[in-house]
Image (cartoon, rainbow, N blue to C red):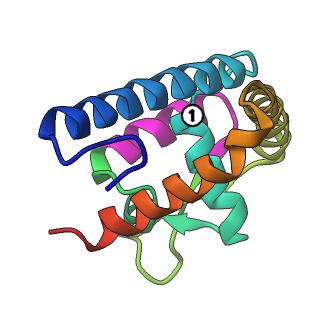
Amino acid sequence: MLPGMQQDPADVGAFFQRLIHAASLVEARLEEAVSRTGLSLAKLGVLQHLVDAGEPLPLGQLAERIACVKSNVTQLVDRLEAEGLVRRETDSEDRRIVRAVITAAGCARYAEAVRAREEAEQRLAQAIPAELRPGAAELLAGLARASATAS
């Protein structure tokens, strides 16, 4: 059982409600920081995968990597393309395949947004009392493992 909780389902439920609320607040702070660069966390995620891949990615593969449906990726790429941050490229061997390619402007905006996100993450981390940080990291790792294996 989690520290400070009994087997009581109400305690467990309250814990997860607090966890979800905290995650929502953290996401809002990070979204706010990234938005100052003209991106959203979703757009930054697309750029992140393109940078990590080091090569153009088919839109279907990009959708798999960010765990969303292809129509959402298409809309994100549409917006990024309108801003000049990515471009579409048709596969030379199979014209049905469209790849997303990050542009130089996209790389620059990506770097700017990553800096903004990391600064916000540092501010949030520093707001957590030092003595709680190791336990918090361990708890989140345990929750991730449990979520991956729980049925």
Q: How many marks do you count on the picture?
A: 1
Residue 102, above or below 33: below
Query: Which of the 4 quarters of the picture holds residue 110?
Result: top right
Q: Is 17 left or right of 30, judged from the image as shown?
A: left
Q: Name the residue under label 1.
A: 41
Q: Which residue is drawn at 65% across and 28% down?
A: 83
Which element type, helix, strand or loop, lies under badge 1? helix
Residue 6, above or below 29: below
Q: Give the range drawn in magenta.
A: 72-87
Q: Which residue is drawn at 50% across and 42% down?
A: 77
Residue 122 lies in the magenta stretch: no
Q: Position of residue 68 (x, y in %)?
A: 33, 51
Mark 1: give few (<14), some (14-19) or many (20+) Cα within 10 Å. many
Residue 79 lies in the magenta stretch: yes
Main SS of residues in magenta: helix
Q: Residue at x 62, y 40 (%)?
A: 44
